């Protein structure tokens, strides 16, 4: 496996999950991980990666997963997928937009996680009495309805 390769979990709790290898050093696969080998000049890896994450494609991959101790899929399950492949230029544009959206989602999720941690810490301080809430009497007036 080299940087940029698209991988898929072939068994276990994450069966069908797709990822992109991001490390500079190469690695080896085992039977539980598959690697896509897209034809050069036909489909670009970043487009294929975005395509494989689509719920419809995930459903098509997992529709015949074999149960038992843990679900698994085979190479044949992957090979029977039918996908639409636009021109290389269109693939690049689609992949670029979706990759930018993914990055923004990651940033927002990180910000949300940080805010949740901040809230948790503040709640702990309030509940232990280390921090007090001051009530502004001017804004805390009774209103007759």
Image (spheres, helix red, strand yellow):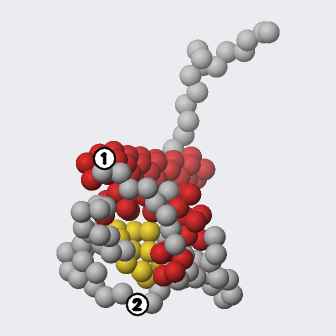
Kindly identify the residue that appears in the image at 24 percent across and 77 percent down.
2
Q: Nearer the viewer, mark 1 or mark 2?
A: 1
Mark 2 residue element: loop
Q: Which residue is mark 1?
A: 90
Residue 63 sits above or below residue 53 on the image: below
Q: Which residue is mark 2?
A: 30
- Residue 9 spot, x, y in % from top left: 48, 77
Mark 1 residue element: helix
Examine the image and state in which quarter residue 60 appears.
bottom right
Work out whether residue 113 can be spotted. Answer: yes
| Dot 1 or dot 2, earlier in sequence | 2
Residue 134 sits above or below residue 106 on the image: above
Residue 92 sits above or below residue 140 on the image: below
Give the distance between the C-alpha atoms of the residues marked 1 and 2, in whole angstroms.
Answer: 34 Å
- Residue 90 spot, x, y in % from top left: 30, 47
Work out whether residue 130 can be spotted. Answer: no
């Amino acid at each position: 496996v080299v940087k940029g390769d698209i991988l898929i979990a072939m068994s276990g709790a994450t069966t069908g999950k797709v990822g992109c290898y991001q490390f500079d050093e190469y690695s080896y696969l085992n039977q539980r991980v598959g690697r896509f080998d897209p034809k050069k000049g036909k489909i670009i890896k970043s487009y294929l990666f975005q395509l494989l994450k689509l719920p419809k494609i995930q459903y098509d991959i997992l529709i015949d997963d074999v149960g038992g101790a843990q679900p698994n899929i085979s190479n044949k399950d992957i090979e029977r997928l039918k996908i639409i492949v636009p021109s290389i230029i269109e693939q690049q544009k689609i992949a670029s937009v979706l990759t930018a959206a993914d990055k923004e989602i990651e940033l927002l999720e990180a910000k949300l996680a940080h805010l949740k941690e901040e809230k948790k810490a503040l709640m702990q301080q309030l509940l232990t009495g280390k921090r007090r809430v001051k009530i502004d009497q001017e804004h805390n007036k009774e209103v007759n309805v």
